[in-house]
Image: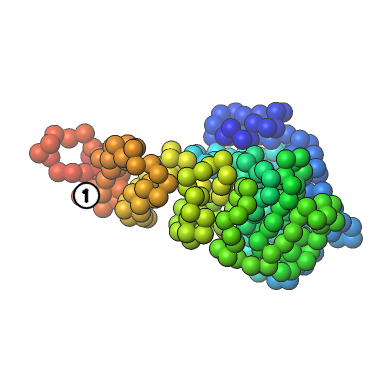
Amino acid sequence: MKQIREFNDSIIIDEQMIIFNANSFNNHNKKHLSHLDELFNDSDSIKIGDKTLQLKEFRKGKTLDIYDETYTKAKVSFDDDVIIPVLSECGSVWMSHTPMEVATCQKGIDIANGHVLMGGLGIGYQANRILSKSNVVKLTIYELDIKLINVIGNTLINIFGDRVEFVNDSIYNAKDIYDTYVIDIYPSYTDFLYDDKIATTFPNFHKDKDKYWAWGDLTFKGIINHAIENLVTNDTDECFYEELLYMKGYKDLYDFWVKVEEDIFLCNGCGYWHELCNLEDDEEMICIDCCDI
């Protein structure tokens, strides 16, 4: 959980549990979500079309899941109550600003340079941070929801002026003419892995990581960890991961994938993907759990 360590006063118990200093997190949000201040003068909740933006109290001790780009899971909590902006749609959380967003958006912020193309506005956290960088000349944001542009987008314009502009269109209709590309349009963290349109829209996306970034673009280790989790639950065909590794240019690491396929296999006993039981070559192919029965 490397990116999380920017909060120096947070307590990292181990790689599976991180306790944030609530004051540090609130100050971080106050600085990088400053554009939202004008929206909450009279109320802690506003309607934006069919969405609702609220400031919600997140209680001390309550935990949240968090993943990084190696698809390593941890839990986070706070040492005191914190206020978290939550954007909901039809009663379901559409996005919220938690430590997960802080950690997983950092790489996109880091690469932003020159004239930046962004896909997806959200609540504007990443846009605010990118526009605060001195090496960013302009930020062009493609966003499908015109009401988000008119409300949250305008708060950014009020602060950053003509350094930010909006296009009410799909990111797949954008041109490959910018200095850097930051794509954050996915409801779930690993949805990017299943998006083959991005590579068609931006042919060099998987070849130049100093220029292109997307939320959920896992590292090689992340793809393997994601694959193992899905194979163990019998969720996804392994062929998908082979194609994904090819697409991302990991052709020289196939020996590693072959090892994964040897160690994690479809058990003849229970029918699930699992680790191979250490039996003699002539024994039936069954998993560790079935060996114990």
Relative horizontal placement of residue 232, taking residue 17 as reference (left or right): left
Relative to 195, say whether 71 is above or below: above
Q: How would you rate the neighbour count of disc 1 (Cα within 10 Å): few for under 14, some for 14-19, many for 20 or more? A: few
Q: Is residue 71 visible?
A: no
Residue 285, image x and y in percent? 18, 44
Relative to 284, say whether 279 is above or below: above
Which image quadrant is residue 152 in?
bottom right
Residue 73, image x and y in percent? 52, 40
Q: What amino acid is at disc 1?
A: Gly
Q: Quadrant of the N terminus?
A: top right
Relative horizontal placement of residue 97, taking residue 74 as reference (left or right): right
Q: Is residue 117 visible?
A: yes
Residue sitting farthest toward the bottom: 49
The answer to which of 120 and 223 lies nearer the viewer is 120
Q: Which residue is mark 1?
A: 269
Q: Residue at x 47, y 59 (%)?
A: 200
Residue sitting farthest toward the right: 42
Residue 160, image x and y in percent? 82, 51
Give the total number of marks visible in the rendering: 1
Q: Residue at x 26, y 49 (%)?
A: 266
Q: Residue at x 36, y 48 (%)?
A: 246
Which image quadrant is residue 256 in?
top left
SS at badge 1? loop
Q: Residue at x 56, y 29 (%)?
A: 14
The answer to which of 21 and 118 lies nearer the viewer is 118
Relative horizontal placement of residue 195, taking residue 274 as reference (left or right): right
